[in-house]
Image: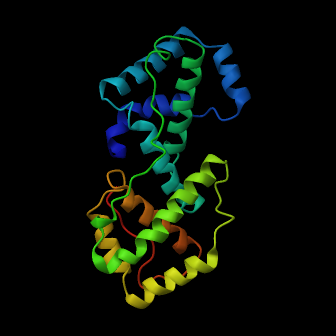
Amino acid sequence: MKKQDLSYLDSAVALYGTLYMRSDFDRFLSNLTDRDNLALSVALRQIAERNHTKTLRWWCDQAISEQLLLKPRLREDFPFRLSQLILLFDKLGDQGIFPFCDIRIEESQTDIIFDWSKLPPRLAYLSVPAESFKLFAEKQMRNGQAELLAADFGQFRELADAIATRGHIGDINEWLRTHPLFEHPEAAAIYELIGFMDNQGFTLDPKVAQPIVNI
């Protein structure tokens, strides 16, 4: 799934993806109009018709993880607002409102299965730190902690030095180009790890900054 595959939700995300506080949701639900109910129902049915109920929340989680690695001025609103739209669907369903109680956006898969055989042997040393970082970041996000404050920066600096010394950032970029993030959890894990180290100012390669990926 790619972002352009979700363009059918642009209108609903723009209109209903701006609720953030619990009081915002409570106020909206207590004043739910037939017009809003219809618009939201149409959006949810479109999700179901495209069989996106199984993957939408996972895509959203991955996209938010990616956006959090970017500087604030470079972040896109869409993944964040989409997550709030999904939360609104959940709350409508919890109140027993049709069709939201019948059509549910499934939870993200919590047990990520990595297949590190996809990595070429020369990049195999990235598998353990990338998987550890991914699972750590997921735990931080579930705990409501977006900034990775408890990270072991010394470990990441050593890894960045190894990448730079071996001249592997180009190989990493090339591998990411051929392994889309939302199809390969291994690529998402490596992208997030590299992006985090780059944002921390660790030198991966003086000629190359953030990796280029095929999302």
Foreground pick, 85 / 150: 150
Quarter of the image for the N terminus: give it.
Answer: top left
Foreground pick, 136 / 82: 136
Residue 112 shows up from this direction: yes
Residue at (36%, 82%) from the top-left corner?
A: 168
Kindly give the residue lying farthest to the right in the view shown. 23
Foreground pick, 29 / 187: 187
Whether 61 is drawn above or below 18: the answer is below
Residue at (64%, 68%) from the top-left corner?
A: 151
Whether 34 is drawn above or below 40: the answer is above
Residue 147, image x and y in percent? 65, 59
Visual colour scheme: rainbow
Residue 174, image x and y in percent? 29, 72
Residue at (29%, 77%) from the top-left corner?
A: 121
Residue 209, image x and y in percent? 45, 76
Instruction: Determine which quarter of the picture holds residue 32.
Output: top right
